Image (cartoon, grey):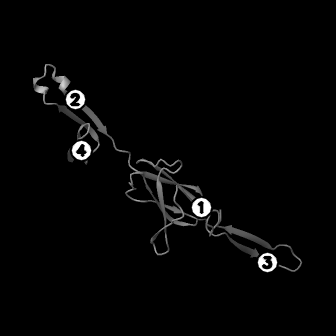
Amino acid sequence: NNITTSVVSTGYRIRLSGLAERTYSLQITDSKHNTAATPAGCMARRQVTLVQPDPVIVNVDVQDNIRCNGEANGILVAHGRGGISFSVPGNPYRYTWKKKDATDIWQVLPTYTDSIAAGLSAGWYAVSITDANNISLAADQVFRLTEPDPLRLTFSKTDVTCTGMSNGTIQAIVAGGN
């Protein structure tokens, strides 16, 4: 803890810094306190409680899954809370979105700066939030956005056994997709 004092036009200033969350008390007395008929008039006592905000946390939800294999239409939404939010309506935190590239390196996605990341393809994403006090998550929230398997169509057939007969079959086998 650091204590500094100074004389100002209205009296004295005492500054305590480096303090943790808790209640602090200060009692001051003037030079006449010990000889006064009513010592309470020469004394002042105050308490102040320092509180800390809740930790910064974020959860990620899928608003829209990728509809078809190879498309880039997924939407992720980050829900931040805790810390001290910015006073900007609708944007209480600063968001940093990243995507893991093909070489497993996280790349910042500079076009996504709020709680919604849209137009996403399949892959690993991470988001971090920072509050108005410049406090960030201890670790990014990581999320995997998946896509459906490619739509595949194959056929199984049985040929007609004899000229003029109608006993052949075709069976379509569909796999993948949604």
Amino acid type at mark 2: Ala
* SS category of the residue bearing label 3: loop
Q: Distance between the residues labelled 3 and 2?
A: 104 Å
Position in image of residue 136 (x %, y %): 39, 56
**Callouts 3 and 2 close, C-beta under 8 Å:** no
Q: Earlier in the sequence, mark 3 or mark 1?
A: 1
Q: Label 4 vs label 2: CA separation? A: 18 Å
Label 3 belongs to which residue? 159
Say whether residue 74 is left or right of residue 37: right
Disc 2 secondary structure class: strand
Give the labeled residue for mark 2: 44
Where residue 49 appears, x then y in whole percent? 30, 37
Q: In terms of secondary structure, where does tag 1 sit?
A: strand
Q: Which residue corresponds to mark 4?
A: 16
Q: Which of 112 and 30 is in front in this view?
A: 30
> Quadrant of residue 137 in the image?
bottom left
Q: Which of marks 4 and 1 is in front?
A: 4
Residue receiving disc 1:
74
Which one is in front, 46 or 169? 46
User: Residue 136, relative to residue 22: is it above or below?
Assistant: below
